Amino acid sequence: MKSSVAIATYNGAKFILKLLSSIKDQTRKADEVIICDDGSKDDTVALIETFIKDNSLNNWKLCKNDKNLGYAENYRKAFSLTTGDIIFPCDQDDIWVIDRLEKMMSVMEQNKDIGLLNTDYAEFSSDKPDILKNYYIFDETRITKIRLNAKNRFLQYPGCVMAIRKSFLSNIEKYWFKSWAHDEFLWCVAISLNQCYYYRYCSLKRRCHEEQTSGHLAHTVDSRVSYLEGELKSAETLLNVLRLEQMDTKKAVRLYKKNLKTTKLRLDLVKNKRLRNIFILPFYLKYYYSKKSYLIEIKIALKG
């Protein structure tokens, strides 16, 4: 089977070379590396071009977008340009463990029912690169199917630790709407279709810094409304996925309907200041990503 690494870059000059080196030095080489740059204003493109040339990486390709597509759409484009059987999404500021590709490809080759494979990762900060949080070495292969429930209906692993079977992506791509983050989309659909798996292996060193796209909470009315409208659309889409893919078990349908109802109540609270929902929503906390969100939305509603 062939592997494709899909990298989305934007103003990543500060860290991009360490990522590229960690991919180049893998114990099993990538069959192709696709890099989509979303209009970087710094030296990202020049650094990538020089790295590819200096290392004679003929199977590495850099695509420069004509206009800024945004995080989600840039990944969608990168995926569309891949030709391998297994796709590895890749953030511009992380560092791959040296046998990441070898081990994850082996798992995917031996387990044909896996649509999406997730691994663990270790965190480090730019100012203390030698201190890894949650890093471990585990020799025994342990692969577990992740079952749908109220908690893991929401994304549990970042896209940078994922491996996607291209045939699976091709089958579900029609459900991917604009602005739905690639990792959240892949996770939600894979777990809904019983093709989401966990591999107990720390495959990546993830950099933590202020410039990261992910991890920012929406604390204003407009940003929270936008976030909740996206959650509403994804819940509606996932119900449609269950129906069209004939996976509409009573348990799964009931969960997504509850999630849908909860999101509507939350949106009504934040957008329309329906304060009575403050007293209704505690009965639906199970269908939040975190209980902290409930308190944030009360604060936003009262402040407005």
Image (cartoon, rainbow, N blue to C red):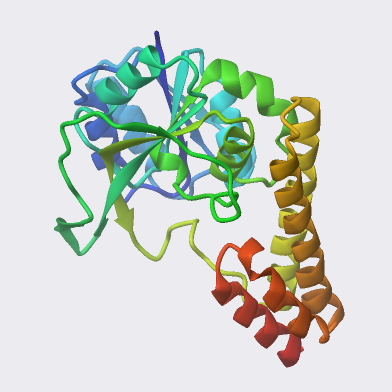
Q: What is the quadrant of the N terminus in the image?
A: top left
Residue farthest along the bottom direction in this orientation: 303
**Residue placed at 30% from the left, 46% from the top?**
121
Residue 154: x and y in percent read: 58, 52
Q: Look at the image and tell me whether residue 97 can be seen.
A: yes
Residue 91 horizontal side relative to residue 279, left or right: left
Q: In this view, does 282 lie above or below 50?
A: below
Residue farthest along the left direction in this orientation: 130
In this rendered view, identify the residue nearer to me: 19 or 252. 252
Residue farthest along the top direction in this orientation: 1
In this rendered view, identify the residue nearer to me: 245 or 163. 245
**Residue placed at 43% from the left, 58% from the top?**
212
Q: Look at the image and tell me whether residue 15 can be seen.
A: no
**Residue placed at 76% from the left, 43% from the top?**
253
Residue 198: x and y in percent read: 40, 36
**Residue placed at 26% from the left, 24% from the top?**
103
Rendering quarter of residue 140: top left
Query: Total number of numbered labels?
Result: 0
In this rendered view, identify the residue nearer to me: 138 or 129. 138
Residue 251: x and y in percent read: 70, 44
Residue 243: x and y in percent read: 80, 31
Rendering quarter of residue 281: bottom right
Residue farthest along the front direction in this orientation: 250
Q: Is residue 180 above or below residue 296?
A: above
Rendering quarter of residue 45: top left
Residue 186 horizontal side relative to residue 304, left or right: left
Q: What is the quadrant of the C terminus in the image?
A: bottom right
In this rendered view, identify the residue nearer to me: 17 or 204. 204
